[in-house]
Image: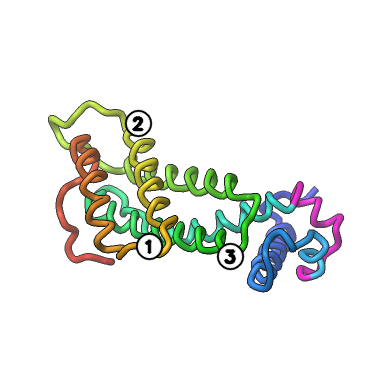
Amino acid sequence: MPTPLDPRVRRTRHAVLEALESLLRERPYSSVTVQDITERAGINRATFYAHYREKPELFVQLVEKHFASVLAAHAPPPGNFTVHDLRWLLQGVCGFLAQVHQDRREHPCEMDAAVDLQVQRQLKACVVDALQHASQRLNSRCVSRELTATLLAGGIYTAANSWGSLCPSPALDAYLEQAMVFLSAGVIATGYVQDEPRQPSKH
């Protein structure tokens, strides 16, 4: 059997993801069938099921792909996690979840819970990676990196999800200022996130 790194596997999975994405621009997820996907991707059903158990698995991978690109653009730089970086990360997650909520209002989908779980997993992994490279200030509160990452990722997700679910959403800059009052206080106390501006800012 081909391995996941086999070029044929990568090409097939890319074609399937692209097929689903293009179909979702035309109609709701609920009306897209596996047959639609295979026809658009130029493969047969047997090939589809050799790579995916079912359509929802493919949908979650599509969400993972798009959120990964958001995190790549907003992830804190290694070794120097600042409040400025935290705000930039929160801003990116806010934008992504606002789009998710807009899509849900227009096209309800039974995959909402799976999407939320995937976003939270990726966000926590991003925060864990950032904190692994961050040096802790001396005389800071004794809080483990793991617990700090869990609470910080949860706070970012909750704040971004709350903003994105509002319709219409309030002004983002004003909302970020308020949310950061809460988020920054905790992580600054742990000593893993520095309370200082980055200069020059890459953002």
Number of numbered discs overlaid on the protein picture = 3
Disc number lying in front (1 or 2): 1
- Position of 53 with respect to 28 (left or right) is right
Q: Residues within 10 Å of mark 1 (few under 14, many from 20)?
A: few
Kind of residue sitting beneath label 2: Leu
Residue under label 3, please give it.
106
Determine the residue positioned at 63% across, 50% down. 111
Question: Which portion, as a residue range, is magenta?
Answer: 40-54
Determine the residue positioned at 86% across, 62% down. 44
**Cα–Cα span, label 3 and label 2:** 37 Å
Disc number lying in front (3 or 2): 3
**Is 49 contained in the magenta span?**
yes
Determine whether the residue tagged by mark 1 lies in a helix, strand or loop. loop
Disc with the residue nearer the chain's start (3 vs 2): 3
Q: Residues within 10 Å of mark 3 (few under 14, many from 20)?
A: few
Determine the residue positioned at 51% across, 59% down. 100
Residue under label 2, please give it.
147
